[in-house]
Image (spheres, rainbow, N blue to C red):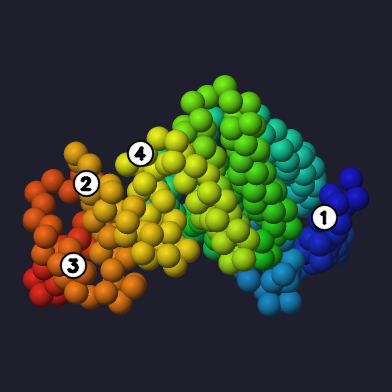
Amino acid sequence: MKIIILNFIRQLPLWAVAGLLELLSLGTFIGAAAGNAAGLFAGVLLFHAAAALVFFLPVPALTKYQNSLKAYERHLYGWLVLFIPYVGLAGAMINALARLIVSRRADVELYKEMTRHEKLSGVFLPANIDEQVLIMESLDVEPIQDILDGTDTVLKLGAIRLLSLRPSPLSVTLLRKALSDRTEEVRYVAHLALINIEEYFTERIRACRQEVEAGREEPSRAYSRLGSAYRQYADSGLEDDKTRRFHLDLAYEAYYEAYRLHPDFNVALALGEICLERGDTGAAASFFRYVLEGPSPSLAARLGLWRSHFEAGDLISLDRAVKETAPLTDYGTDDPQKIVLFEFWKNPQETALAG
């Protein structure tokens, strides 16, 4: 209740100015009626119109108090004051206080919903999906960014809720930006969303570790799932460089154990990508070569091998690997970035001209 009162107090200067103008209008009306001074009725209309315009016009002295209300709310109250003299102002104040109470209760319900982790367990992205691409395509990040840059608190809370259900480096970046929002409720819910995302990853790692220790699942698959959990946490954007490297090392250990128990092309590809991120280009190249020896070598493995040679400074091996790769008609992926990168390495001059 204290917070509700404080929020209403923030708006009081706005209501006070409008109320003062309405009182002046009412006083002028009474004076005009008592003294039969028809000329004063112009003052009645002037003061009354000024009281309504307080909610429409950006008065410099009242800007911050006007901003404590959403634009559509201010305009609604302005029309009430204008078309329902005197009584309209009282009704608008009651409505504003009621909306504050309802909004506060809605925030409490949102808090309860976001802290019920069992409701969220089935909506996070599977481990084998490129989360950043999916969130860009499916969630329309640019509109979400526009919402977070806007002034509508309700829409911001909805955008944060949506981002909290799709953990990715990009969503974490947007949520962290929301931590500096001017609205207390937005900062609070963004903080909750980041806690939810972090707890999701830590809980997933804990569950995967339990599966490995329990031995109920085929060991190589259990270790692979654990490696995926560590890697997703490392790539989540939640960690600094030091802790990210720590979880990448744990991901490598888990994946390598899975690979040792049962050599698998997908696991080898993940190991190669982790080795690249750890700066071990030699090991990365070995894993990518193993994947390329399989029946259906992936585009990611080709690009990974080329990158390994490039980052190692082995341009001779890079040139040989690129020339040994035939042009592709089926890339095996819908990721435009990978396709463009492949074409750049294969035909750098044509790609440059096309660009």
Considering only order in the chain, which callout, 4 or 3, is on the residue closer to the N terminus? Answer: 4
3 and 2 marks in contact (CB < 8 Å) = no
Residue under label 4, please give it. Answer: 264
x, y percentage for residue 239? 61, 60
Disc 1 crowd, CA 10 A, few/some/many (<14, 14-19, 20+): some
Of residue 153 and residue 160, the one placed in the foreground of this image is 160
Considering only order in the chain, which callout, 1 or 4, is on the residue closer to the N terminus? Answer: 1
On the question of residue 102 being in view, the answer is no
- Secondary element under disc 1, as helix, strand or loop, is helix
Of residue 270 and residue 290, the one placed in the foreground of this image is 290
x, y percentage for residue 285? 32, 60
Amino acid marked by disc 2? Glu
- 263 left or right, relative to 115: left
- 57 left or right, relative to 33: left
Residue under label 1, please give it. Answer: 8
Residue at (44%, 41%) from the top-left corner? 260
Gap between marks 3 and 2, in whole Å? 20 Å
Disc 3 crowd, CA 10 A, few/some/many (<14, 14-19, 20+): some
Residue under label 3, please give it. Answer: 345
Q: Total label count?
A: 4
- Secondary element under disc 3, as helix, strand or loop, is helix
Which-is-in-front pick, marks 3 and 4?
Answer: 4
Residue under label 2, please give it. Answer: 293
Which-is-in-front pick, marks 3 and 1?
Answer: 3
